[in-house]
Image: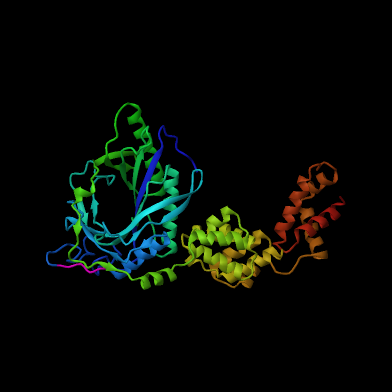
Amino acid sequence: MGVIKSARPVVIGLEVHLQLNTSSKLFCSCSTDYIGRTPNTNVCPICLAVPGTLPIINDRAVALGARMGLGLHCEIQNYSNFHRKNYFYPDLPKAYQITQYELPIAVGGYMDIEGDGGPKRVRIHHLHLEEDAGKLVHPTTDGRMTGAAYSLVDYNRGGVPLSEVVSEPDMSSPAEAREYVTRLRQLARYLDVSDGEMESGSLRVDANISLSNADGSLGTRVEIKNMNSFKSIERALEYEIGRQNKVLASGGRIIQETRLWDDSEGVTRSMRNKETASDYRYYPEMDLAPIVITDEEIEKFKEDIPELPWEKRERFARDFGLSKEEISVLTEQKELAAYYEGVVNAGAPPERAANWVRMEVLRVINEAGCSITGFGVKPAVLAELVRKIENRELSNTVGKDVLDLLVKDGCSLEDAINRSGASSAKLTGSSLDGLIATVMEANADVVGVIKSGQDKKGGKAKFLHGLIMKESRGQADPKEAAEALSRMLEL
């Protein structure tokens, strides 16, 4: 993990918005499946703020918010409520946003990450619920606001439930910020709280960054928005660190403001002066009753929390003896981790199973453009294939061919082995000698070099051995084939 060099200590805090996995919006029954819909068709009088309409809280959104809070080791509040956050912007039909302010659903907590200098704990200030805004569309060639003669607004997304996770300013580099968001997304996916897809906007990040003053006090904070990938988070923060250092080094001062990240140009641009809480004129939402969660309900939420990513990583290291790199890949998605465990539980050696899931299963998935849930080979079938390779009944090369046939045609393992040209029967004795003789005859020039004593480093003999193993389609034992080849070459 790289460390950005800065003349002053860097201080970073993040606000991460997660779109919650609900079928309906936060305060009405409109669908949250808005992607690809005709603009302004996934709306109703409530999310369009028609006078006289009243919001109704989505209980599942509340449960998911509490679930995420528990995953972050937060304290779930027995009592929380909503406020109106007042600001005028075209994508907000009410001219205010319903959000939690003074009494959020979850407070405290932490997320452990791998920091620049080793393990690091990032504290969580709070997690709150709020509704999403609509989406502005700027009719320019590049979709940016600059240069647009006008803007269009699509309210289909307005009212979709969000949980906002607000960290303390505990990160000190762009790399740590990226690591934090990566782990936060993984947690949300393990808990089925959100799919965390930055590309579709279901995970959005706002960064607050400052450089410490010479006396150690915090410098002026700048907010950065419009970072829509993990790479852009890191790039935007790197740029902003450099920009602020230059301003301070030239004797200037940092202005408290909100800046937009321009990914194509690789720069941040000033958007507006940074508002304070008083600018939003928060006051309690009168049309919604407070959220009351009993201790019994909190205990039930805790019972439903599955094994978390860091717990699974520790168990995989302890039970399967895997490397840190192997564990990182296998536990990235809980579905992939479950598939791997299914292969091991069906009798495959943990280390070889890890290699096959990491390398071959993910290769097939990436080529097919699907997920592990769409992978057609059951764990028990892959376990049997891995066992045959482990027992040297099949070679790795043949095993890959067999896996491709299993995926492509959905046939049985036995059929796939037969159709690959291999067999579970061992090629040994006179049958193996016959195969070796055929290979030697087809490569008489190579055999001549070896017998003349010119193959001092054994490269030619290894070449013949490789051809023999290839022609045997995994039926020959490598050691036995090597011994038989040496005997027939009279070495």
- The residue lying toward the viewer, choosing from 403 and 25, is 25
The quadrant in which residue 394 appears is bottom right
Q: Main secondary structure of the magenta part?
A: loop
Name the residue: 72% across, 57% down.
469
Instruction: Give x and y (percent) for residue 247.
Output: 32, 30
Q: Is residue 160 left or right of residue 461?
A: left
Residue 56 is covered by the magenta coloring: yes
Name the residue: 77% across, 50% down.
443
The quadrant in which residue 209 appears is top left
The magenta region covers 53-57
Residue 265 visible in rendering: no
Name the residue: 31% across, 59% down.
128
Type of colouring: rainbow
Instruction: Give x and y (percent) for residue 53.
Output: 15, 67
Q: Is residue 308 above or below residue 236?
A: below
- Of all residues, the one furthest to the right in this rendering is 490
Q: Is residue 17 above or below residue 47?
A: above
Instruction: Give x and y (percent) for residue 341.
Output: 57, 66
Q: Is residue 451 left or right of residue 74?
A: right
Residue 137 visible in rendering: yes
